[in-house]
Image (cartoon, rainbow, N blue to C red):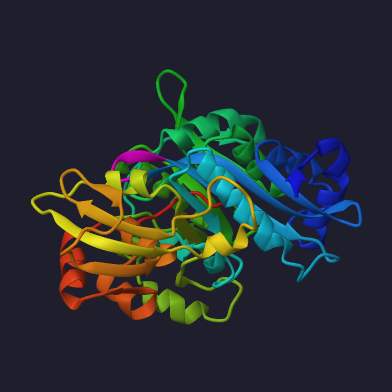
C-alpha cells in the first residue's frame, strides 16, 4: 500500500469511482477536489491502483467538548480487485494512521452492517429522514428574501457549517475542499440562505432538485439558533406552491412530525407513488474509539463516581499485519467515571468487571445505546448491578453527526 499520487493514479482512481457509480464522466473536477482534500491510501494490482481509502481530519462534539476526529469518506475497490481483502487492509491502516495523528475517534459511513465491525467499528444512532409536502409544514414565521448560493459560494458555506449550532455527537470535517466537492457532484444542486448585517453567511439550506415538482433533497441545513432554523423551514414551505415533496433530515431535540399537518393522511394517500411521504430511520454511520484515555477523560458526570475493570477486545489488531506503532486498544484497564474521569492500565482488585469489544464500548461511551441494551444485542458483558449503574451514570443525549462522509 502507498499514498495516492494524483499524476500517477488520477485517471485510474477516477475509473474506480465511475465503476462503482460514485461519479459521472463530467465529475472529474469534483473528484479531484475531494481527493485533494483527503489523505488517500491506494493498493496496486498489476501495477495500477485498484483500491483506495480516503480520510479527512475533523472534530467530534462530546457534551460540548471538541475531540480530534478522522472521517473515512470513501472506501472503494475496482471491478478487478474484489474479494482480495484490499479494502479491509487499507481501512485498517487508515485507522491506525489516524490514531497516530491524534484522532480520539474515527467514523465512517457503511455500505452494509458487519464489514467494518471487523475493524472495531460500532453502529451509530438512527438518522430520521422525513419526506413531506413542504406546503403542509406548520410554520407561521415570516422570512426574508434569501440569497442564492452555488459552488462559487463554497468557502463561505464551509465556514458557516463550522460555525453552526453544535450538539452531542456532531462532526465537523475541516478541509474546505470536501464541501466544495459536495457542491459540484450534484447536477441540480442549489443553495438559499441569509447573511447578517456584516455580510457574513449565517444560515442556509443546500438542496438537490429532482424535476419540476421534486422531490427536493435537503442535503444539509446550517443555522446557529432555532429561530434561524425556523426561518429556513418557512423558506422551504414557500416552495410548496410548485414542489410537492421535500426530503429532510431531522435535527436533534426536535420531532419534525410536530410541524406536519395531517402526516398520516398524507402518508396513506401518497403510498407507492413518486412522492411518497413518511419518516424513515436508519443507522448508516459507525464510530470507534482510537484514544481511550482522551475519550474517557472527556466524560464528566454529576454527583456520581463509578469505577470498574474493563477487559477490552479490539478486532483491528489481527488486521494490521506486522506494522509497528498503533495496534489497537486491546487490554485490561481500570476505568473511573465521575466529575473527573480517567483510565489506567491494568485491573484494580476488588472492582466489578466488564468485558467488551471496542465496537460495543464505543457505542456505550458516545451514548448510542445504554449498557443494558448493548449487553443484549452487542458484545458487552457485565453483572446486572454494573449494567444498571452504567445506565444511571451515562445518561447522554442521542448523538447525531450532522455531516455525511
* Rendered location of residue 275, percent (x, y): 56, 71
What secondary structure characterizes most of the magenta part? strand
In the image, residue 295 sits, relative to residue 143, either above or below, namely below
* Rendered location of residue 245, percent (x, y): 53, 63
Q: In which quarter of the image is residue 203?
A: top left
- Is any atom of residue 17 visible in this view? yes
Q: What stretch is highlighted in magenta?
A: 62-67
Q: In this view, does 339 lie to the left or right of 128?
A: left
* Rendered location of residue 138, percent (x, y): 33, 58
Residue 222 falls inside the magenta stretch? no
Residue 66 falls inside the magenta stretch? yes
Q: Which of 252 and 208 is in front in this view?
A: 252
Query: Residue at horizontal 40%, vertical 37%?
Result: 164
Q: Which of 172 and 371 is in front in this view?
A: 371
- Is any atom of residue 244 visible in this view? no
Q: Quadrant of residue 228?
A: top left
Q: Which of 46 and 327 is in front in this view?
A: 327
Q: In this view, does 90 lie to the left or right of 110?
A: right
Query: Residue at horizontal 61%, vertical 57%?
Result: 320
Q: How many labels does the image show?
A: 0
* Rendered location of residue 209, percent (x, y): 63, 54
Query: Residue at horizontal 25%, vertical 55%?
Result: 335
Amino acid at each position: 500500500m502507498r499514498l495516492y499520487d494524483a499524476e500517477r493514479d488520477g485517471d485510474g482512481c477516477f475509473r474506480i469511482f465511475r465503476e462503482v457509480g460514485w461519479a459521472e464522466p463530467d465529475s472529474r473536477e469534483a473528484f479531484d477536489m475531494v481527493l485533494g482534500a483527503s489523505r488517500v491510501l491506494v493498493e496496486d494490482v498489476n501495477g495500477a491502483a485498484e483500491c483506495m481509502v480516503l480520510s479527512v481530519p475533523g472534530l467530534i462534539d462530546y457534551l460540548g467538548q471538541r475531540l480530534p476526529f478522522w472521517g473515512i469518506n470513501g472506501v472503494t475497490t475496482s471491478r478487478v480487485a474484489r474479494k482480495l481483502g484490499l479494502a479491509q487492509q487499507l481501512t485498517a491502516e487508515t485507522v491506525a494512521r489516524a490514531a497516530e495523528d491524534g484522532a480520539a475517534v474515527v467514523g465512517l459511513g457503511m455500505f452494509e452492517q458487519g464489514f467494518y465491525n471487523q475493524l472495531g467499528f460500532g453502529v451509530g444512532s438512527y438518522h430520521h429522514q422525513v419526506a413531506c409536502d413542504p406546503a403542509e409544514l406548520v410554520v407561521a414565521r415570516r422570512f426574508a428574501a434569501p440569497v442564492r448560493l452555488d459552488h462559487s459560494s463554497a468557502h463561505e458555506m464551509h465556514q458557516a457549517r463550522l460555525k453552526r449550532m453544535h450538539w452531542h455527537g456532531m462532526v465537523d470535517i475541516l478541509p474546505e475542499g470536501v464541501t466544495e466537492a459536495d457542491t459540484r457532484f450534484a447536477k441540480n444542486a442549489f443553495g438559499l440562505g441569509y447573511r447578517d448585517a456584516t455580510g457574513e453567511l449565517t444560515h442556509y439550506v443546500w438542496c438537490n432538485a429532482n424535476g419540476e415538482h421534486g422531490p427536493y433533497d435537503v442535503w444539509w441545513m446550517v443555522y446557529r439558533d432555532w429561530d434561524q432554523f425556523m426561518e429556513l423551514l418557512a423558506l422551504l414551505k414557500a416552495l410548496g406552491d410548485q414542489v410537492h415533496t421535500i426530503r429532510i433530515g431531522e435535527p436533534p431535540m426536535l420531532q419534525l412530525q410536530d410541524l406536519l399537518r395531517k402526516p398520516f393522511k398524507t402518508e396513506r394517500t401518497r403510498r407507492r407513488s413518486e412522492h411518497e411521504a413518511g419518516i424513515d430511520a436508519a443507522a448508516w454511520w459507525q464510530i470507534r474509539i482510537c484514544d481511550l484515555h482522551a475519550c474517557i477523560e472527556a466524560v464528566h458526570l454529576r454527583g456520581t463516581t463509578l469505577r470498574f475493570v474493563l477487559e477490552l477486545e479490539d478486532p483491528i489488531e489481527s488486521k494490521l499485519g506486522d506494522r509497528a506503532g498503533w495496534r489497537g486498544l486491546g487490554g485490561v484497564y481500570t476505568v473511573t467515571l465521575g466529575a473527573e474521569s480517567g483510565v489506567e492500565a491494568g485491573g484494580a482488585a476488588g472492582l466489578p468487571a466488564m468485558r467488551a469489544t471496542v465496537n460495543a464500548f464505543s457505542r456505550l461511551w458516545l451514548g448510542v445505546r445504554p449498557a443494558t441494551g448493548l449487553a443484549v444485542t452487542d458484545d458487552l458483558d457485565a453483572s446486572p448491578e454494573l449494567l444498571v449503574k452504567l445506565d444511571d451514570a451515562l445518561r447522554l443525549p442521542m448523538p447525531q453527526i450532522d455531516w455525511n462522509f
